[in-house]
């Protein structure tokens, strides 16, 4: 069993093999740590590229700009419009694959334009335990996953990020807003905006790790079980429920299982097909 420091040394050796590198950068825990290490090793031969899209929370995008600037990284923003992709909008279980195929092709085009040797993303070994169709797209496009090569787990990355003084070390996990919509339900812009606005309401109330799943007229809230007592406080409910209903939801429900990362993947193979 390798120690966390040994894993970090492997990561450094992996990154040293590249002459120049694009980091697919979201501003989350993983990609921030990867960018931080890559910048130390390769300096201005690293380019962070961030997607600007309606499917990504606007707060996450703003965070990515601030973090890249703080790290002193070269930063390029690319516009992506996944809702124009029929394979994404139809929301089948390969939605993530379609999304990543599109993104990685854009990154490859940027790589050629900028004369960059390689492209990497911030996947870690824990990601291998979940349903991740995007990994197939990464492999097909030759996208590197240095932190998987180094054997780094999410907890490793959080610990090393803390040691580096990165503000993201304890940042909650975040995924694109389309993951809040059940497979088989077509994705539309108004649904994405409803979800983001509802989650902003919860964030403002102190629920930092939360999801609002879109089930037509029903907003299904997922928060951590140890926060149930907070959300059921009568005064807080009087604020949250009406505000979420104003967005267009008729019913606001609390998922009694609590927040579980990747929960929507449990429906793979059991979802209705939206015609």
Image (cartoon, rainbow, N blue to C red):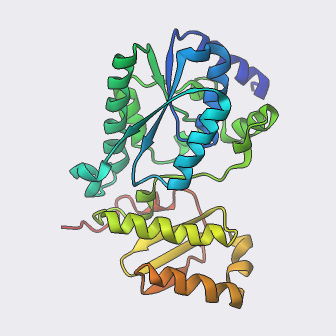
Q: Quadrant of residue 258?
A: bottom right
**Closer-to-camera residue (129/53):** 53
Residue at 38% in and 28% down? 107
Q: Position of residue 8 (x, y in %)?
A: 72, 23
Residue farthest left in this picture: 275
Q: Quadrant of residue 185?
A: bottom left
Query: Picture coordinates of residue 81 (x, y %)?
Result: 31, 47
* Location of residue 267 by image quarter: bottom left
Image spot of residue 260 (x, y percent): 59, 62
Q: Does the rendering let one see residue 37?
A: yes
| Above or below: residue 31 compared with residue 12 | below
Q: Which quadrant would the C terminus be assigned to in this image? A: bottom left
Relative to 160, 216 lies left or right: left
Q: From where the camera sits, is residue 151 visible?
A: no
In-front residue for pair 11/40? 40
In the image, is residue 265 above or below residue 2?
below
**Residue under the point 40% across and 13% down:** 115
Residue 105 left/right relative to 8: left
Rendered position, 66 above or below 143: below
Asked whether, in this view, residue 138 is left or right of residue 259, the answer is left
Residue 143 position in % (x across, y down): 43, 25
Callout count: 0
Which residue is at a point 66% across and 62% down the rendered structure image?
208
Quarter of the picture holding the N terminus = top right
- Taking 211 as reference, is 41 left or right? right
Answer above or below: position of 168 versus 262. above
């Amino acid at each position: 069993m390798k120690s966390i420091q040994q894993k970090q040394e492997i990561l450094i050796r992996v990154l040293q093999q590249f002459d120049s590198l694009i980091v697919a950068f979201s501003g989350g825990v993983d990609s921030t740590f990867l960018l931080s290490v890559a910048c130390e090793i390769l300096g201005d031969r690293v380019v962070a590229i961030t997607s600007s899209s309606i499917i990504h929370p606007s707060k996450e995008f703003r965070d990515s700009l601030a973090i890249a600037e703080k790290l002193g990284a070269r930063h390029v923003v690319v516009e992506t419009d996944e809702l124009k992709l029929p394979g994404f909008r139809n929301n089948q279980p390969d939605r993530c694959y379609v999304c990543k195929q599109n993104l990685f092709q854009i990154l490859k085009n940027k790589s050629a334009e900028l004369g960059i040797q390689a492209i990497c993303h911030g996947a870690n070994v824990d990601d291998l335990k979940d349903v991740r169709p995007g990994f197939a797209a990464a492999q097909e496009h030759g996208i590197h996953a240095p932190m998987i090569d180094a054997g780094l787990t999410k907890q490793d990355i959080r610990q090393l990020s803390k040691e580096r003084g990165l503000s993201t070390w304890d940042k909650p996990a975040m995924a694109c807003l389309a993951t809040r919509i059940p497979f088989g339900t077509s994705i539309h812009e108004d649904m994405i905006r409803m979800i983001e606005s509802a989650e902003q309401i919860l964030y403002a109330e102190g629920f930092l790790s939360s999801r609002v799943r879109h089930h037509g007229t029903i907003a299904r809230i997922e928060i951590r079980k140890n926060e149930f007592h907070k959300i059921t406080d009568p005064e807080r409910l009087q604020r949250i429920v009406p505000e979420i209903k104003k967005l267009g939801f008729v019913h606001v429900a609390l998922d009694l299982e609590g927040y579980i990362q990747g929960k929507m993947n449990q429906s793979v193979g059991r979802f209705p097909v939206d015609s």
